[in-house]
Image (spheres, rainbow, N blue to C red):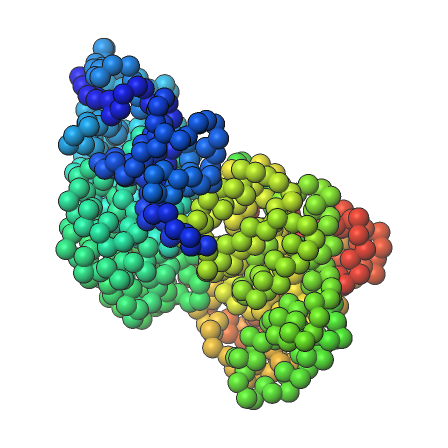
Amino acid sequence: MQVYEYESTSSGHELARFIVLYAKVSTRKHKRWEGDGILLCYANQAVLKSEDEKDVISRSTSIKCINDLQNGRELKIGSWEVQIQERVATRDVPGSSFSSSCGSKLLNIRILNVFFSSQLSGFLYTFVLFSSSYSVKGPAFVINEDRVGNFGEEPIVADPRVSRHLRTHQKEGVRFIFSALKDGHGVILADEMGLGKSIQAIVATMALLKQQSCLLVVPSSLVSNWKCEFRKWFHGARLPVIAVRRASDISSYACSFSAYPYLIISYEMALRYSAKLASIRFDILVCDEGHRLKNVDTKLRQTLDCLAIGRRLLLTGTPIQNDIKEFFSLLNFVRPNLFDNFADFKTMCCNEAEAVSEKFSNCFLRRTSRINNLHLPNKNDYILFCAPSLVQKSVLASLCAFMNEEPFVLIDMMRKVSNHPAILFKKISLIYLGKLSVFVEMMACFRQMKECVVVISNFTKTLDMLSSLCRSLGFCVLRLDGQTPVSTRQEIVKHFNTEGNPENVFLLSTKAGGVGLNLTGASRLILFDLDWNPATDMQAMGRIWRDGQEKDCHIYRLVTAGTVDEKILHRQIKKTGLNSMIIPNEQIKTTWLDNELQDVFTLRDTQCETHDLLNCDCDGQGSLPSGVNYVTGVHTEDVAHFCSDKRQTEDKKEVETASDFHAAVVDNDDEVGHLETIRSLLFRWHHYSPSHTETWTHFKSIAGLRDLPFNDLTFAFHLSSKF
């Protein structure tokens, strides 16, 4: 039997309840919210309370209409300002107390559940695993099913209110995480974007917490996202989390972790308050975007290591970004001493693939986005090659002449000039040329189609330029970059997704917003410039094609033809391929050789250097290229086999294993091999040239660009897929 006690906190019944941000009234243009709170509305007053409802912060009788309190609305409660975040279910019940008991026993097993009770004085919040009778429709999800059969353990069943939403692969992930952490070990969940890593982590760790604590370390931009993820599953109930905004939050958690088992903190604040965290005994460590810990020499990695939390869960969609050593580093973080050293690990990958696979099969799980085939709409990828203007060619030629001075500084300048020369040189007017000309026409087409758009760039000045341009075109600009306060980021995202207004355009910084954000309110995404790290771009482009997306997605990469843009594209393909190949080749260097630098500083007068490299016989007519044998010798035969045959077989593959790592360390460090990689991957794309009017018109229709001439487009690649 369960008994729930409740005492009313105010005369009259609770009419509405809102999650809010609050701060002292000030004249600041950019408010600094002091914390999260709860706004309770009664018939005769509104009461602002702290997040845990222990403290009454202020009261007001000036609120006349509850329906006016929409998300984002700001109002004054006494000497405090609040911003409405979300309306949630009320907890008011008639009378001062009630009790409930369950009748017949429907499940005589242990059920994972959460219940809450509150009292006016001595607030009590309880988060427990309890033996319960619970009416479950459909089969129960037994998290430790294998342990029940093999070891006779008592079954642990996930709360059906959550488990009924889990897909098959997510249930498998929950069981995998639970089993590893249950034994006191660490684990990496490396599912690709959009497969629900966060909910798998929540359900699995929740099943392990019995008056214990979990430290959840995430990028600063995702603190609010994680709170929203908990709120999604604990809707109408108090959240079992404390999010750290200041040092005092850690002190509060230390006194109440039995009531609030999860502490969410950003990586930056974890580093800043490492001493305070070390004073708390955490049972589980969860690191979102865990690839940030790939470098063992960083202070962040060393700080988290020193917390001495044995059970560790890393969540990452990109376990390797540059070389296989990064993967070894992450494995060593969750399972120290699993391998003696990196040299032995690399040797085993090359010579004993099956042994390696067996060794880390219990601590590494990755499923590809193909697993979402049945759940997500189609995805259309485009690479649009834009003609550089005469001004751009002139400026780029001048920069190339100084190659031997500061090459990497110059490369950065060349990237900005490829976007628009006005970014570097203010005296150059902001005229529509190259990428910008194509961008303006694209925005006009999407507005006519009533499609919402996300635009992404690596550079703040490029975002500044695009922001001014979009406003001049009459768009309402929403922007998220490194300067956007963390406290407001989630509200900006929510506003964009819920409003669905095609007059809104969302400008996003690749680095600040490229992870964790859900922007399914848009079905069109423009990547205005490319990043040297393909994983960064893949993360950014995954913002719209993910769970919750109902429309077919169209993702456009803009590339200035013959310039450094195309060199970045080629390097991306060499490292991981355009289709999110997980394991890059170990021998592909992250440093530069002299001939590679020379190539970067070489401008080519061409419609599309990438297509020129392919020696493709399609002539840009849109048909798939015919099969041509490009293998030139024994040395590249295995590489060609890996890049083409393996790519075809991966279409049937959802889980990646150590054999992929074995293939990743074949000797492929020659120019011909790199060219084979580019050819084998881009031969899956359709190639279009404007010189063929009929097929070019067909391409523009597919891409949603048919109503304008797009004279500055010189070539295009297109791939339609479900992954």
Q: In this view, does 289 lie above or below 165?
A: below
| Residue 586: image location, x then y, percent | 44, 69
With 167 as the anchor, is 183 left or right in this view? left
Q: Residue at x 17, y 39 (%)?
A: 258
Q: Of 169 and 90, which appears nearest the observer?
A: 90
Q: In this view, does 552 lie to the left or right of 76?
A: right
**Residue at the (42%, 39%) spot, across then down:** 75
Question: In this figure, what is the number of numbered marks?
Answer: 0
Hey, which quadrant is residue 465 in on the image? bottom right
Image height of 255 relative to 436, above or below: above
Quarter of the view holding residue 165 = top left
Residue 369: tell me if it is visible: no
Viewer-closest of 653 and 437: 437
Residue 594 placement (x, y as % from top left): 54, 85
Position in image of residue 562 (x %, y %): 69, 72
Q: As rendered, which of 277 and 408 lies closer to the eye?
A: 277
Q: Residue at x 58, y 76 (%)?
A: 413
* Residue 405 seen in this snapshot: yes
In the orientation shown, which residue stands out farthest toward the top? 103
Percent from the top left, x then y, of residue 228?
39, 40
Residue 448 occupies which quadrant of the picture?
Answer: top right
Give left or right: position of 451 versus 584: right
Vertical arrangement, residue 713 with respect to residue 119, above or below: below
Q: Nearer the viewer, residue 247 or 126?
A: 247
Quarter of the image with the N terminus is: top left
Rendered residue at 47%/66% (across/down): 585
